[in-house]
Amino acid sequence: MLIQQRTAEEISMKGSRTKTANTVREGTLIVAVDIGMVSNHGYCMAVDGRSTKTFSFDNTREGLDSFWGMILSSKTRFQCTEVIVGYESTGPYGEPLIHYLRQKPVTIVQVNPMHTKKMKEINDNSPLKTDRKDPRVIADVIRLGHALSVVVPEGDAAYLRRVNNARERHVKERTSLLNQLQQFVFVIFPEFSRIIKTIDSKTALYILKKYTTPAKIGRVKLEKLGVEMRRRSMGKFGAEHAAALINFAKTTIGIEEGVEGLVMDIQHVLMQLEMINRLIAELEHEMEITLHRIPYSRKLLAIKGLGMVTVAGLIGEIGDFTKFSTQSEITKLAGLNIYEISSGKRKGQRRISKRGRSLLRKILYYAAVQTIRENGIMHDYYQRLIGRGMKRIMALVAVSRKLLRIIFAIVRDDSEFISNYESKRKEVIRKAA
């Protein structure tokens, strides 16, 4: 084995699987990389302290091949038998290097940026940050055992992660556009929201696209607008709402100067919203197709409250469930592990670490909101927590943790979810007696 287990703090990183901290064994070459967009800086060190100078290599095939050559020469020079390569969390810039190294006989690990920051000050009592200093600090962190192994999603899981990330970006863009639209409409027609309260409803978007200004709405025949509003809203709005909207349009306090410029803004926003909605629909269709290829997705979709987007997001964020052996590991991946800071007689408040995949926590949180509804699978559990005096937000976090453990157990054991398991078990026992 390359590394030996020891008890220590465990920290979850983006794109990583949390494991118990490890001490690097003798005979292992530690290779640290400070990753950049154009070029990277590397550093090779044996466990006994022998090391190379910091060197640079480009993010090209030639650069990565020269980096691998440096690793092999250092491995021979220091008489090492195995190699561990570590890097600091850097977003997308490290992904080409990681995929390159996955084809090599090395172990890839990741270090927490907070650890490297603290280690810099420990080493030379200075917060100085340079490209040549950082790889040495990363190597020291790895040697002390504060590193995390990296799990890179493969196949359909990797595809779902990309699709889910793209959908998340477009949803944020849509929210931003809707906020802009609401502001533009308020300037020229502030009374609009008194009749149609949600700016992203089909009725609101239809009227704004077809009529846009209060003047145009005021000239529409009542019967025509009533039919259009009723049809678009599936009966929610009718002639009385159309009459109120027309009346407000004729007496609006909205601005009259420069309206043409705002109309252009509104039309442009509406065009972008249509495009983004099409993109989101296409991404969700891809999610659905991909889930059909993943056998255990059917069992997750059978859980009441977990929809297609939620399940696709969970699989994309977690990747290969088989890479995790315990529930605590997958809980730390989501940053839902509990910690407290206590000293002497003072007992600190229990909190979640949030040192994990933030999108995974978000998905679980919204799933928890769905499952605590009336007749939801987590409704009774949530009510018990509230009944014990737990704050609602904390109870939702607890539900998120429980949901994740249930999902992990279903995939791990290849089992089905049984709602009201305890009551059904007691009923079977009663009948058997």
Image (tube, grey):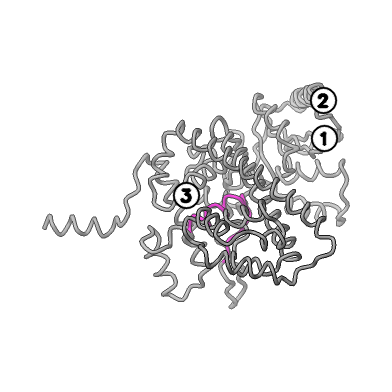
Towards the viewer: 326 or 227: 227
Q: Which residues are magenta?
A: 351-368
Earlier in the chain: of badge 1 and badge 3, it is 1
User: Which labelled disc corresponds to residue 63?
Assistant: 2
**Three-letter amino acid code of the residue under disc 1:** Asn
Magenta stretch, main secondary structure class: helix
Earlier in the chain: of badge 2 and badge 1, it is 1
Q: Quadrant of the C terminus?
A: bottom left
- Residue 193 lies left or right of residue 321; in this view the side is right
152 shown above or below 193? above
- The answer to whether residue 361 is magenta is yes
Reading the image, the residue beneath label 1 is 40
Q: Secondary structure at mark 1?
A: strand
Earlier in the chain: of badge 2 and badge 3, it is 2
Q: Position of residue 379 (x, y in %)?
A: 39, 63
Towards the viewer: 132 or 262: 262
User: Which labelled disc corresponds to residue 402?
Assistant: none
- The answer to whether residue 230 is magenta is no
Reading the image, the residue beneath label 3 is 327
